[in-house]
Image: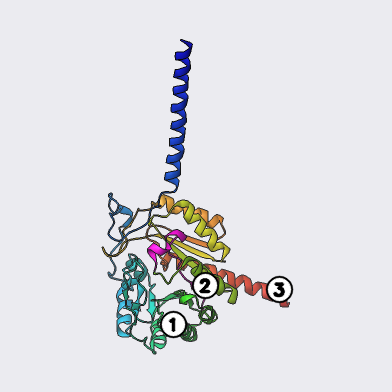
Amino acid sequence: MTLLYLSIVLCLCTCASYTLQFRAHLSLVMSSSPSIVPRVGADMPTSGRPNWFHVPAPGGNNTKYNELKATLKDLDLHTVCEEAQCPNIGECWNGGTGTIMLLGDTCTRGCKFCAVKTAAKPPDPDPFEPFKTAEALKKWDLNYVVLTSVDRDDMPDGGASHFANTVELIKQVKPKMLVECLVSDFAGDLNAVRTLALSGLDVYAHNVETVERLQKYVRDHRAGYTQSLSVLKHAKEVNPKVYTKTSLMLGLGETKDEVIQSMKDMRAHSVDILTLGQYLRPTEHHLSVVEYITPELFNWYKAEGEKLGFRYVAAGPLVRSSYKAGEYFLENMIHQDRVKDAVTQRKYYF
């Protein structure tokens, strides 16, 4: 009986030992398994697009949509709102906000999330575009404008001087207009960054786009997480009075921890403003959506970003880099800061 009892105990101990080893091995396998990454042609979320993505159609009576569209057509200007198929075009244009895209409508890079046309050697930019842009803005009843562009790796400075000329001309015809430039990384050329940062713009924006792990799956190989952060940091170092801004697309397979780490990295590189929005696949030839982020989670990210010290965080399913609500807030924030600076300077001199 004693021998039988000992045999049973030994057998149970051996089984328990193998069970613990199996669990440890399973845990190791799971922790080292490849993380979720977005793919072109992958299945979309089975639940379909949630109802919070419904937006009103653009146009209508008593709006500025048709006026802005007509002016852009007359002056042969482009907007990223149309080229990138932004879902907010109705809200922003009806409210009198548009984002003008400089340097043509063809990009030298091929990011897997973007619907803008691509080519290794796009047509040369219109040398009169800075003048046309200033002329258009002189006609529009706006206080805040966003200038953006395609990537132009075929140009010596990536188009930085073209941007700078445009900003300077805008400030000549409308000195009080606030100008945000949402630009490429200029291939990491810090001299190009300096040129734009000292042009008289108010907000220097460049998008990191996604968390560090997903960069190679989402962006063109010439872009990079560290390069983008260094561009934003250098703009702030060159001109401490400029506001720096970046954006992340969510729903591409990133984790909450990765998003928070990206926020921390941005703050470590002196980024002031962050926008967070849902990635939406423009066509079947682009990356599939991995998941739809809920409005509640966007609100949580917004709160976490504010805790980390961002001056402003815009977060929501339809938020984009250039977004009317965010620009309205920025406009007020910048004016308040400048009033405070003026009061401080008067106190210093008197």
Q: Are marks 2 and 3 in contact (CB under 8 Å)?
A: no
Which residue is label 1 attached to? 159
Residue 325 position by quadrant: bottom left
Q: From the viewer's side, name the closer residue of 54 and 294.
A: 294
User: Residues under labels 1 and 2: Cα distance?
Assistant: 15 Å
Sequence order check: which comes first, mark 2 or mark 3? Answer: 2
User: Residues under labels 1 and 3: Cα distance?
Assistant: 41 Å
Sequence order check: which comes first, mark 1 or mark 2? Answer: 1
Q: Amino acid at mark 1?
A: Gly
Q: Quadrant of the N terminus?
A: top left
Q: Give the magenta-colored segment's residue range.
A: 201-219
Question: Which label is found at residue 231?
Answer: 2
Which residue is label 3 attached to? 347
Q: Which residue in the rendered view is the most extreme toward the bottom?
A: 128
Q: Quadrant of the C terminus?
A: bottom right
Residue 336 horizontal/vertical position (percent): 57, 69
Residue 23 horizontal/vertical position (percent): 44, 36
Instruction: Determine the residue positioned at 65% across, 72% down.
Output: 343
